[in-house]
Amino acid sequence: MSRRKIVAGNWKMNMTPAKAVELIAVLSPVVASDDVDVVFCVPSISIIPAVAAVKGTKIAIGAQNMYMADSGAFTGEISAPMLVDAGVSYVIIGHSERREYFAESDVMVNQKVLKAFEYGLTPIICCGETLTQREQGITIDFVRQQIKIALLGVSSEQVKKAVIAYEPIWAIGTGKVATTEQAQEVCAAIRVLISELYDEAVAAAVRIQYGGSVTAETAADLFTQVDIDGGLVGGASLKPDFGKIVNY
Ligand code: PGA
């Protein structure tokens, strides 16, 4: 089965709402593609103007995080129903920066993934090892554990729609991209895990991205690996080069 490629830009904490609208005007024409799903994951405060700015294009807007409750006394958080109401269709869950700086655990990631599916949002579920873990030779064990926990209680119909982003932490924002062999090896291992947890058909449907210092130069080699279905792109998603990455 052929999976549709998906390239998502993770804007992180960059761009004011006004600048976000300007950047979308620059990027929209260059990222146009009939073959690739394109998502801009913008800061929450820019979601509403971003949704308006992509109207009439095929670009989808994603959030970078959400909380696992529907509403309540959780000062500073935003919920799945808020995202849906604002016109969001994707949400990054468990990015390594959230895990590291905001103490997000695997259990929280699982709760957020379940909540995203409950509201019809597509989670982009992040996983990936540290440099120490890679040097210790435990990359695949570690990533398997992250994904196993993230998917607890998730049905096969839901998993089929999920996006998983393999992002080695040592490659994020460092300019040190994983080799195509390293990226393919882990993405293949994730697909094997999905076939063990669910079945072959589910494993064949789930889309797995690579992320970590993807550039216009490296995108084509990475995204054409058999188990890599696109990318989650940070730094390079804020530049017109993002068009080259989408149209690798
Ligand atoms: P980078 O970030 O492309 O700047 O390395 C990727 C990410 O954190 O999603």
Image (cartoon, helix red, strand yellow):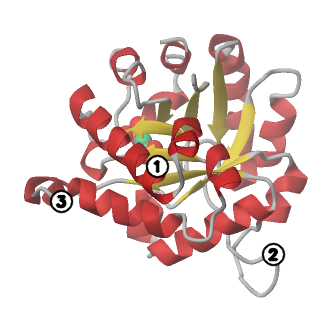
Measure the alpha-carbon separation of dots 3 and 1: 21 Å
Q: Tell me the element at label 3.
A: loop
Residue beneath the point at 69% across and 45% down:
62
Quick check: 101 above or below 229? Answer: below
- Does residue 12 appear anywhere in the picture? yes
Q: Tell me the element at label 2.
A: loop
Disc 1 + disc 2, Cβ < 8 Å: no
* First in residue order: circle 3 vs circle 1: 3
Q: Tell me the element at label 1.
A: helix
65 relative to 236 in the view: left or right: right
Q: In the drawing, what numbered circle is on residue 53?
A: none
Residue beneath the point at 34% across and 34% down:
213
Binning the other alpha carbons within 10 Å of mark 3 as few (below 14), some (14 to 19) or many (20 upward) gives some
Ligand 1: image quarter: top left
Measure the alpha-carbon separation of dots 3 and 2: 36 Å
Q: Which residue has dot 3 on it?
A: 138
Query: What amino acid is at disc 3?
Result: Ile
- Does residue 179 appear anywhere in the picture? no
118 relative to 31 in the view: left or right: right
Q: Which residue has dot 2 on it?
A: 70
Question: Residue 183: horizontal and vertical position, in percent?
Answer: 30, 35
Q: In the drawing, what numbered circle is on residue 195?
A: 1
* First in residue order: circle 3 vs circle 2: 2
Disc number lying in front (1 or 2):
1
Measure the alpha-carbon separation of dots 1 and 2: 31 Å
Q: Residue 85 or 148: which is nearer the viewer?
A: 148
Question: Residue 84: horizontal and vertical position, in percent?
Answer: 84, 54
Residue beneath the point at 55% across and 18% down:
246
